[in-house]
Image (cartoon, rainbow, N blue to C red):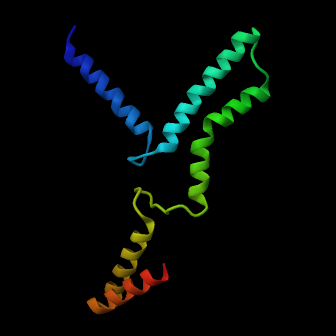
Amino acid sequence: MDLSKLTNYAVSHVDWVKRALSDNGNPSSSRLFGALSTVAAIFCLLFVTVKNHAAPDALTTGGLAAFGTAPYTVNRITGMFGGQKTDQDGGNADKAALVAVAADATKTNGDKADMVASVAAAVKEK
């Protein structure tokens, strides 16, 4: 068996896990905790099934599903209501807005002093 094929196979899976546990290339602890709590919920579901010799009711299954997704859900809801704003590329949206204000000032006036003044005013507003 060719060892390089096995190594490439393992590296591709490691990259997949890195992408799965990140938001736009940034590491995401909420996704990591969500994955761990999902594994714990699956273990609990299997334990209850084996002990009772029957599948649990919908309330137990729904509760375990909510437990498994809670860290990621809480993080996303927190981000919607006042967390750091990010643009589509994962950058800081406030900085992107300041750059847009500066670019608009240079197009309108063409003067560097006006650009600096408009950026300073935008920073003070934030």
Q: Position of residue 85 (x, y in %)?
A: 49, 63
Above or below for 105 versus 80? below
At 65% from the left and 16% from the top, the residue drawn is 46
Rendering coords of residue 98 (x, y %): 40, 76
Res 114 quadrant in image:
bottom left
Q: Position of residue 45 (x, y in %)?
A: 67, 21
For residue 2, above or below residue 7: above
Q: Nearer the viewer, residue 66 or 8?
A: 66
Residue at 72% of width from left, 32% of height from top?
A: 63
Give the side of residue 80 with respect to residue 89, left or right: right
Q: Is residue 80 left or right of residue 97?
A: right
The answer to whether residue 111 shows anywhere in this view is no
Report the quarter where the N terminus lies: top left
Number of numbered labels in the structure image: 0
User: Residue shown at 67%/16% (left/top)?
Assistant: 47
- Residue 116, can we see it? yes
Q: Residue at 63%, 27% (x, y): give it.
A: 41
The answer to which quarter of the image holds residue 80 is bottom right
Q: Nearest the camera: 99 or 110?
A: 99
Nearer the observer, 28 or 23: 28
